[in-house]
Image (spheres, coloured by chain):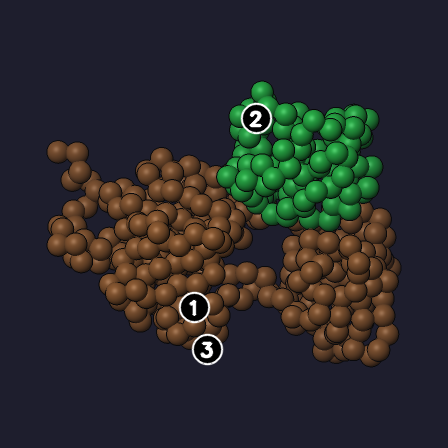
Amino acid sequence: MNKYDVIIVGGACAGLSAALYTARRALKTVVLTRDIGGQAAITTEIENYPGTGTILGPELMNRFRDQAEKAGAEIKMSEVQAITKSGNEFVVKAGVEDYQAPAVILSFGLTHRKLNVPGEKELTGRGVAYCATCDGPLFRNKIVAVVGAGNSAIDAADYLSEIASKVYLLVRSDSFRADEADLVEKVKNNPKIEIRYKTEITQFVGEKKLEKILLNDGSELELNGVFIEIGYATQTDFLGDLVTLDERKQIVVDNEGKTSTPGIFAAGDVTNVPFKQAVISAGDGAKAALSASRYVKNLKGLEDKPDWNKKK
Amino acid sequence: MELNDQNFEQEVINYTEGPVLVDFYAVWCGPCKMQGPIIEALAEELKTTKTKVFKVNVDEAQETATKFDIMSIPTLMIFRNGEVAETLMGLNSAEVLKEKLQKYQ
């Protein structure tokens, strides 16, 4: 069992900022995360993170990571499968390892919404993709489809039409939800884009890579790639009834980053805070960290001193 | 440690003394910027061993990227005796990579 004071689940704006704060309060901190930087790391340019001017998303997130590590936080690339209560503490299972701590900060953000149809999971990264700007250039002169009807789907279709030889835009209803009227018109008039309304994918088919998709009208399309652009959702199902979720399966927090369960804190896009922004996540990460610090030190009977008093 | 379409076969496929780790990346890919330094440090650490570590820019080595069906980056492949032994997608830590490479010594 690996023992810590604080376990942080998720390593992007909220989690890495929380790690910086708990590590600076001399709490033994580990960040368990599938990737570094989350959505910010796949954003080309960030122009609204105060103090940094215009910065590349990955660069900003590398700085978050470096600063958290320099402060003493450990960062482990491992996906968390389960969190259970054990006496006064929590056991977090990630990969083959178990981690234990009195406080846990949940900051694993939002992930791409999936279609949840057969073949999707198996062919992810082998033709099924969720980020046109990330993987799009790998489909030069190939046939691709975009699934969705919102702004991100329209943007993706427009972007991919410059790379791929042909783009199908698969829309579930009979109209677009996108509010960028000009871009919708542009896409409708683009000869490389074929829009199919009332169309849903029922299965992804392919041996080693995606070869074709089956559609709800019984037809099939041969293609090389499908970009699923139907928005983001929290992946909180693995938490079970550990903490209270709202109707959108976001973690409910109070104004100190506390969840319904003492010892469990949350911050960033995974919470019910309505605004999903890097700077808000970073701020809320710090807030949750300070709450967690106070909680752990109370539990241990220590005084929770602010870090600016450390070097006397 | 950067390979192209011309030397890929010689350095990776024809190498039989140990496993070869190849990082397929592109300059425009965010997660690749996180993976890159991990790969470079690993290459430095393993440079006196029989394990080889290379990077392949998918925009420059298009033939190689197509041949191995790279459709998501970063993609990391471990080759042993000219065959793909393992394919890893997304960001991977040095610890995980070393553990995987150990299997193919």
Q: Where is residue A202 in the image (x, y as percent from the top left)?
A: 75, 73
Report helix, strand or loop for mark 3. loop
Along the viewing direction, whichever of A34 and B99 lies nearer the viewer: B99
Disc number at residue A239? 1
**Circle 1: is it few (<14), some (14-19), or many (20+) Cα within 10 Å?**
some
Choose top left, top right, bottom left or bottom right for residue A72: top left
Amino acid carrying mark 3 in the image = Glu
Which residue is identified by label 3? A247
Q: Which residue is drawn at 74% across and 60% down?
A: A226
Along the viewing direction, whichever of A297 and A79 lies nearer the viewer: A79
Chain under callout 1: A
**Above or below A243: residue A121:** above
Q: Earlier in the sequence, mark 1 or mark 3?
A: 1
- How far apart in space, not on screen, are marks 2 and 3 (Cα)? 50 Å
Chain B is which colour? green
**Circle 2: is it few (<14), some (14-19), or many (20+) Cα within 10 Å?**
few
- How far apart in space, not on screen, are marks 1 and 3 (Cα)? 15 Å
Choose top left, top right, bottom left or bottom right for residue A116: bottom right
Which residue is identified by label 2? B46
Q: Nearer the viewer, mark 2 or mark 1?
A: 2
Chain A is which colour? brown
Amino acid carrying mark 1 in the image = Leu
**Above or below A41: residue B25:** above
Chain under callout 2: B
Choose top left, top right, bottom left or bottom right for residue A67: top left
Q: Which residue is drawn at 82% across and 79% down?
A: A217
Q: Are marks 2 and 1 in contact (CB under 8 Å)?
A: no
Same subunit, tags 2 and 3:
no
Q: Position of residue B79 (x, y in %)?
A: 71, 37
